[in-house]
Amino acid sequence: MDKILQAIEKILEDRKSASKDNSYVASLYNQGTNKILEKISEESEEVIMAAKNEGKEEIIHEVADLWFHSLVLLRHKNISIEEIESELAKRFGISGLEEKASRS
């Protein structure tokens, strides 16, 4: 899975220099953070609705859309997948309750 996420990350980075008229991702970058966040919000709602009302395939489809738009946000903010992996690695093996308590 790492390879597909890293391939997507590279494409998303390349889209930063693409024309907004020829690339959906470039158009999102051009519209800025708020537009990207709108898409993430929309996709999150679609995941929730799919989980409540649809079958497994629809959930998979909607989560893929959510992940994609989350990756767009990360590239827009110049955050790499590696940075997210590092954060997850720090949390690995730690109780979720402990990890949450350590933030305050």
Image: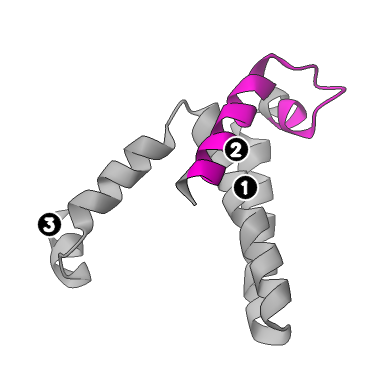
User: Looking at the rendering, which quadrant does residue 91 occupy?
Assistant: bottom left
For disc 1, the neighbor class at 10 Å (few under 14, some 14 to 19, many from 20) is some
Percent coordinates x, y for residue 49 in the rendering: 69, 76
- Amino acid carrying mark 2 in the image: Ile
Residues marked 1 and 2 touching at CB (< 8 Å): yes
User: Judging from the image, what secondary structure is the residue with disc 3 in?
Assistant: helix
Going 66% across and 73% down the picture, which residue do you hit?
Answer: 59
Per the picture, the main secondary structure of the magenta-coloured stretch is helix
- Amino acid carrying mark 3 in the image: Ser
Left or right: 24, with 40 as reference point? right
Against 68, residue 10 (above or below) is above
Percent coordinates x, y for residue 30 in the rendering: 71, 23
Percent coordinates x, y for residue 23 in the rendering: 80, 28
- Give the number of the disc on residue 68: 1
- Give the number of the disc on residue 21: none
Going 69% across and 57% down the picture, which residue do you hit?
Answer: 42
Residue 104 in view (yes/no): no
| Sequence order check, earlier mark of 2 and 3 | 2
Against 46, residue 69 (above or below) is above
Q: CA distance from mark 3 to mark 1?
A: 29 Å
- Give the number of the disc on residue 102: 3
Query: Which residue reaches farthest right?
Result: 21
Residue 4 in view (yes/no): yes
Give the residue pinned by disc 2.
Answer: 8
Q: Is residue 31 magenta?
A: no
| Sequence order check, earlier mark of 1 and 2 | 2
**Mark toward the viewer: 1 or 2:** 2
Q: Which residues are magenta?
A: 3-28
